[in-house]
Amino acid sequence: MGSTLKDIASLREDYSLASLLERDAHSNPIEQFKIWFHEAVMAEIEDVNAMTLSTLDENAKPHARIVLLKGIEENQVVFFTNYQSHKGIEISQNPHVSIVFHWKELQRQVRIEGIAAKISDVESTNYFHSRPKESQIGAWASAQSEVLSSREELEARFAKLQETYNDIEVPKPPHWGGYAVKPTLIEFWQGRSSRLHDRLCYTLVQDAHWEMKRLNP
């Protein structure tokens, strides 16, 4: 055990791919995020839209998991899930969430804090029907976050639903849909040599006005 921990502690990498200076950053962090996201896509990063979403339960205990970014609409970050899942219940109790993107290949990280709210049912339905049919059926088959007795139970439920919706459209479950996170803080982290990383943090001070500050690494 001691040897393994020592090996972990010795893992190091020097960051020298790029820099992030105020003169090169967009004054609007949403636009800066779009620039970085496009560059991540062009770099062919696997699961480029994967993001860590953190929520708080009723006891202010944090919970984090990976979800997928599905859009940036009206300057908000959009993702979809089961509203009855742990994350859905926690958001209904406390809409303040935190999101982190990590693009290791570019030595970059983006941290977003904001408030989550459900998008319209029409928007959720439109996206639901754009998904593969198997994924649509899966949204009905899985009582997300609830205890499952066995893998076989889930697969049997899925198979039965496949028969039910074999030749007809799958309706969107009422408990499934999207959230839009309105950012109140966005921080961009660019790895730099000697751990002297660049950190530019934007804070929303008015409806459309952002204040940018450089933070110590």
Image: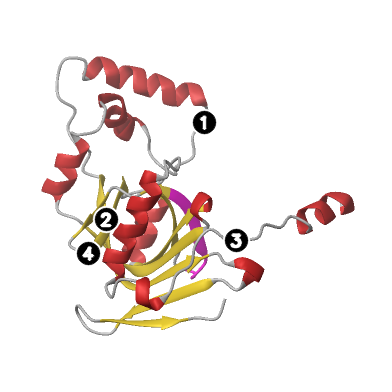
The answer to which of 73 and 43 lies nearer the viewer is 43
Tell me if residue 146 comes above or below residue 152 in the rendering: below
Tell me if residue 139 comes above or below residue 213 in the rendering: above
Could you tell me residue 74's position as x and y percent? 17, 62
Q: Residues within 10 Å of mark 3 (few under 14, many from 20)?
A: some
Q: Residues within 10 Å of mark 4 (few under 14, many from 20)?
A: some
- Measured in 3D between alpha carbons, the distance from the residue under mark 4 to the one under mark 3, in whole angstroms, is 30 Å
Which numbered disc flags the more N-terminal residue, 3 or 2?
3
The residue sitting at 88% across, 51% down in the picture is 3
Which numbered disc flags the more N-terminal residue, 1 or 2?
1
Amino acid on which disc 3 is placed: Tyr
Q: Which mark is residue 179?
A: 2
Residue under label 3: 15
Figure coloring: secondary structure
- Is residue 61 highlighted in magenta? yes
Magenta span: chief secondary structure: strand
- Is residue 42 highlighted in magenta? no
The answer to which of 155 and 42 lies nearer the viewer is 42
| Closer to the eye: label 4 or 3 | 3
Residue under label 4: 75
Q: Which residues are magenta?
A: 59-66
| Closer to the eye: label 4 or 1 | 4
- Measured in 3D between alpha carbons, the distance from the residue under mark 2 to the one under mark 4, in whole angstroms, is 13 Å
